[in-house]
Amino acid sequence: MEMSDTDKIYDRLDKLLARIESILPPQHVSSDLGTSIAFRWRKFAHTGYIQAIAHPHNIVLDALHGIDEQKRQIDQNTLQFVSGYPANNVLLTGARGTGKSSLIKALLNKYASKGLRLIEVEKQHLIDLHDIVEQVCRRPERFILYCDDLSFETDEPGYKALKVVLDGSIAMASDNVLVYATSNRRHLMPESMRDNLDSRHIDGEIHPSETIEEKISLSERFGLWLSFYPFDQTQYLEIVHYWLAFYGVQDITPHIREEALRWALGRGSRSGRVAWQFARDWAGKCKLKHG
């Protein structure tokens, strides 16, 4: 039987759709939130989805040295959160390599058995925060939305999206979601001399400019601020000692301490990250030498 014109059109459309589908990327579906303790928000074209992280970082709180007070405060806040009690969003700011990000990962490992989950969100995806919250707000777990190394330039769209999630909009903020963010900037935005020049002096009092007020308004929405400072030499060497022992180097000689200090001098920093990097380098060389 000869095909009608209509059938021919349908047949050509079917073939055209088949060819289009063959070159389209696969459709991504958010992971089952029961399959892992850590996730990241991924974006393809205009579609976002939650992707499970197969091997989350397994660092523990005891591995972090020189930040005892910061650990105490954020641990208390996180315990309140996983226990179903009121808790605050947290902003961790300060010197690089002092354990801000590692601290959040260590808390996940400590409280995962109590239902804590972590979703990493990159800065360019902060405009999707409302969609992420919508996907998890009815879940029994407690979710930390983790934003690492966060900072904004003027008028970035993610800035306002984060403000809404932190402070709530017309909808009530979800009680099973908190934001933990790290940054090298205390107020998350660049501060220029021009901002101070715009400040007003009235009856001997300084009134910050509207620009300054706007810049600090975001960081003020975090209920808990934790500041991190560069380590002194003693703290740096304590961290070196810990990581060398972790990698199997038990005898810490004066020569090793001297090499550790030289390593830090070459990098212009005595941070925890630098101490860890030295320990890996030294332990690796020792193991290679002694087979």
Image: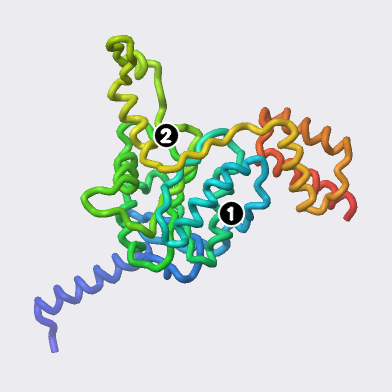
Figure quadrant of residue 58 = bottom right
The reply to whether residue 7 is in sight is yes
Nearest to the observer: residue 263 or residue 244: 244
Residue at (90%, 52%) from the top-left corner? 290
Q: Amino acid at mark 1?
A: Ala
Mark 1, residue position: 106
Is the C terminus in the top left, top right, bottom left or bottom right quadrant? bottom right
Q: Position of residue 57 (x, y in %)?
A: 59, 56
- Crowd band around label 2 with a 10 angstrom C-alpha radius: few (<14), some (14–19), many (20+): many
| Residue 85 in the figure: left or right of residue 74 | left
Quadrant in which the N terminus is drawn: bottom left
Few, some or many C-alpha atoms within 10 Å of disc 1 (few <14, some 14-19, many ≥20)?
many
Q: Identify which residue, 271 or 282, lies in the foreground.
A: 271
Check the image and report above or below for 265 versus 129. above
- Asked whether residue 24 is in view, the answer is no
Tag of residue 188: 2
Q: Amino acid at mark 2?
A: Leu
State the separation of the CA atoms marked 1 and 2: 23 Å
> Residue 25's spot in the image, x, y percent?
37, 62
User: Mark 2: which secondary structure?
Assistant: loop
Residue 81's spot in the image, x, y percent?
45, 57
**Residue 109: percent from left, percent from top:** 57, 60
Mark 1: secondary structure: helix
Residue 113 relative to residue 181: left or right: right
Question: Which sits in the foreground, 149 or 137?
Answer: 137
